[in-house]
Image (cartoon, helix red, strand yellow):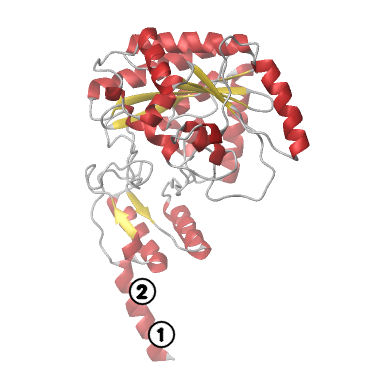
Amino acid sequence: MQEATSLFSIRSDFIRIMSFDRPLALPPGISQQVFENFLSRLAQAVGSADITVVRSKDQFPDGGYLEQPSSHDAFYVREKDTFIASAFVCPRSVDEVQHVVRAAADFGIPLWLTSLGRNLGYGGAAPRNMVMQNVPSLRYVLLDAGFSGHKSDYTSSKEPIDDAGVDAIAKKLNLGHWNFYGALYGPEEIRNAHWKLIKDAFSTIPGVKFFFPEDIKEFCVLHNRHKVLQGIPVYEELRWVDWLPNGAHIAFSPISKISGDDALRQFQHVKQRCKEAGFDYMGTFTVGLREMHHIVEVVFNRKDPDQRRRAEKLIRDLIAECAALGWGEYRTHLAFMDQIAETYNWNNNAQMRFNETIKNALDPKGILAPGKSGVWPSRFADLKSKL
């Protein structure tokens, strides 16, 4: 028994003095020695092979939706090292995850959790046996053009595509400027009744056309949506990211009541701002049960500093302008979380004060995704609004 105890002590000492490379960026307020001690503790649970220290912003390729880097934002709108991890660890079980969180609490290391979720057209990770909410979407034709090819396939101009160019693309793809995708669920009798109501309503639009997946032989967005609305995940939907070379994107996603007037106002305002900033408008309206969200994808060349700067300014301007018009966003990039949170400021920021109270009560050491959705723990209060 004594021999076994001695062997354990030797092993424990060995792990405790393991050395790790210095990361490119240490967590705020954390010394190199504390960080090494934290990683050594993690190695006891997950093994050093599942711990990677991020030493350089170019240590890992940018990748994309299919090969996401764990070290940094694949679609960086600022410099690549603005949002970069100090290290990443890959626990393989619930016990290992718990060990990581306990160690983070002991050493005060902030954690940001990531997974393989890629928001793949909302299809999820696998086909699901469940009742699905029908989420119809109204897509601008350039989003569908991005699915079918690159911008250079349609024009040699570097400028935003004008209305005549959009019209030519729509004719080439046999699409409208706007294209509505949806699904019908339930017994055949119910589907047929719903289809008659829908067709009668949309037939009032001059020149409207209707297609089912079997009506089109060439693979297109409609076939993709046919899978997504069944809960089948797809990757092809994301081809529009490659609209430009070194394609990256950030989304501007305001919500509104389900209103044609609101949709038209948002479209006209956002399209004009995109044009002024030098970007094509690529948007879709998604209609939920009680609200409508307008997802505008600003696609830019991540290797071009000027495009990154213009893309960030465009989003910041839109956040401020739309807040003044009564529209807030439901999701955003890390760089804009503080700004958007500040627009929900009714009653002397009552919602934020409530959120911060809960945050500090449930996460007193401030280690769980500090700053997520603009909610900062008191420990990192000095970082608020600095992004």
Place of residue 192 in the rendered image (x, y in percent of width and height, measured from the top left): 73, 31
The residue that mark 2 highlights is 12
Left or right: 353, with 340 as reference point: right
Where disc 2 sits, the SS reads helix
Q: Residue at x 30, y 45 (%)?
A: 26
Question: Which badge, 2 or 1, is on the more N-terminal residue?
Answer: 1
Q: Is residue 152 visible?
A: yes
Q: Is residue 188 above or below residue 55?
A: above
Q: How far across and how far down the image is residue 267, in percent?
A: 50, 12
Q: In the image, is 31 to the left or to the right of 193? A: left
Which of 267 and 277 lies nearest the eye of the viewer?
267
The residue that appears at 62% across and 17% down in the rendered structure is 346
Within 10 Å of the Cα at label 1, are there few (<14), some (14-19), or many (20+) other Cα atoms?
few
Q: Residues within 10 Å of mark 2 (few under 14, many from 20)?
A: few
x 35%, y 61%: residue? 50
The kind of residue on which mark 2 rests is: Ser
Give the number of the disc on residue 5: 1
* Residue in front for this viewpoint, 367 or 116: 116
Residue 33, compared with residue 315, is above or below; it is below
